[in-house]
Amino acid sequence: MGNPFIANLSHYVKLTGGESAALDILLGKRVPFGPGDELVTPGRAGRHCHVLLQGQAFRHRNLADGRRQILLFQAPGDVLDLQGLFLGLDHEVTALSRGEMAIVPHEAMDALLDVNGNIARGLWRLSLVEAAIFREWMVGMGRRSAHARIAHLLCEVFVRLRVTGIAQGDRCPFPVTQTHLSDALGLSVVHTNRVLQTLRADGVADVRQGQLVVRDWQRLKLAGEFDPAYLHLAAAAA
Amino acid sequence: MGNPFIANLSHYVKLTGGESAALDILLGKRVPFGPGDELVTPGRAGRHCHVLLQGQAFRHRNLADGRRQILLFQAPGDVLDLQGLFLGLDHEVTALSRGEMAIVPHEAMDALLDVNGNIARGLWRLSLVEAAIFREWMVGMGRRSAHARIAHLLCEVFVRLRVTGIAQGDRCPFPVTQTHLSDALGLSVVHTNRVLQTLRADGVADVRQGQLVVRDWQRLKLAGEFDPAYLHLAAAAA
DNA sequence: CGTGAACTTGAGATTTCTCAAGCGGGGTGG
DNA sequence: CCACCCCGCTTGAGAAATCTCAAGTTCACG
């Protein structure tokens, strides 16, 4: 198991040995972090991209009065702030677990993108997949019940973590509190708790002690109207 | 007033005269359309990008049982399916009004992007801004009341249409039904109707007969917690 | 005029929220 | 080593936002 970022990118574009090597060098500078650490903030972002290599994190926006919307859960291999390369960040990233990330200066990134259109396209695709996930969440928050929304999120998390090789059998680490889940889904903690209990009682899925256990994948998919197409995991084949 | 696509792209990257000319040629093939026309569908998308030049449209996903989620309202100058260049579409685009769009073969697009990194970056930025809008809608649907959500949407539409030069004074064409609005915001038509009435009665804003009238911009912004930063309209300056 | 789509209104039903309180486990200071 | 405390989980119950159903109205258009 090599560099998870390279593995991730490889889902969306074919990389040569030389390109992988270049990316490995690009991700040379690495720093460890712990749960709750703010990995990226609009202010402190500076001129760097951050690539998650180990552990989990989440992107979120905080509103003035304490409300929070979680926008995405991040898995190893994800770039946390690709947007920052071109636009300036409008949200932040916080760690869920211990882990490690690489810090890449924008100049180095830029230089590589300039000479290598293949990698540039891969990263562009990465940002398009991210947008596809946002759209799917919009559908959920706009048009799905709390029950379906939660089931859908659990499906997504499980599939994405399985792809990174983090899942083991029917379970994967998912170190979130019920508060995280409610802020991701636009629900209150109380209601999230109650829905999770029904999923648990029905033997469908169980989120507990930082771990997601999928007890009945078929029923979970059904409950969440989950169709993994939007994750575009087969795009590299195209 | 030249090509609205070039004007749009210019917000995000500086274009030379030669580049503008190349883009103008790229958008050579144009077709008219009428309200309700399906401009882009996953099936019929083929190997083309579609660029809106005149009129308005909306991106949406339809669920099995008739539920619909509108993902974005499109203004002249927008690329309707940039994603299709790299990933395959997972939603469709329908026209709101009469108008005109350009149809660009993927090969021509690809060829231009290969030789011109500046335009490639501009388009990449365009897709990042789109993602930023998605995130903002997520925040709205997850954490804002129906009242704030509607106000926020009206702010966004007004600002974006004003940038394209379509707005006139305090009003702009916005040919949507209340059903469109509810499907964009994740509300029922009845509730949308009632909230619109309060905005109207309070002299804040008025959506009627295909037109949005902003009667009190300050209060509308306030009601929607609207901060246009996420539209990144000043990015070209960077 | 006739018609259909869009808008509006009323009223009861649901979902989801808020407030409030109790429980439980892990971490820490004494 | 134990008691305490905090955070996260759970439960109960009333409140609020929003939905659904159903019917009436308006308006543009043929």
Image (cartoon, coloured by chain):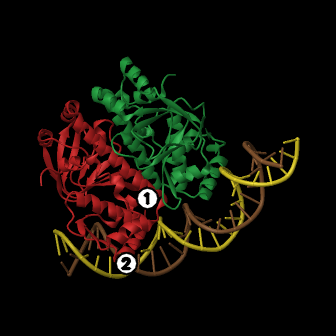
Chain colours: A green, B red, C brown, D yellow
Q: Give x and y (percent) for residue B117.
A: 24, 34
Report helix, strand or loop for mark 2.
Answer: loop
> Which residue lies under the disc numbered 2?
B202
Q: Kindly tell me whether residue B42 is visible in this rendering.
A: no
Residue lying farthest to the top in this orientation: A17
Q: Nearer the viewer, residue A194 or B78?
A: B78
Q: Amino acid at mark 1?
A: Gly
Residue B114 image-quadrant placement: top left
Name the disc covering residue B140, or none. 1
Vertical arrangement, residue B57 with respect to residue A108, above or below: below
Give neighbour class at mark 2: few <14, some 14-19, many 20+ (Cα, 10 Å).
few
Q: Which quadrant is the C terminus of chain B positioned in?
A: top left
Dot 2 falls on which chain? B
Q: Give x and y (percent) for residue B27.
A: 15, 43
Residue B120 image-quadrant placement: top left
Report helix, strand or loop for mark 1.
Answer: helix
Give neighbour class at mark 1: few <14, some 14-19, many 20+ (Cα, 10 Å).
many
Q: Which quadrant is the N terminus of chain B positioned in?
A: bottom left
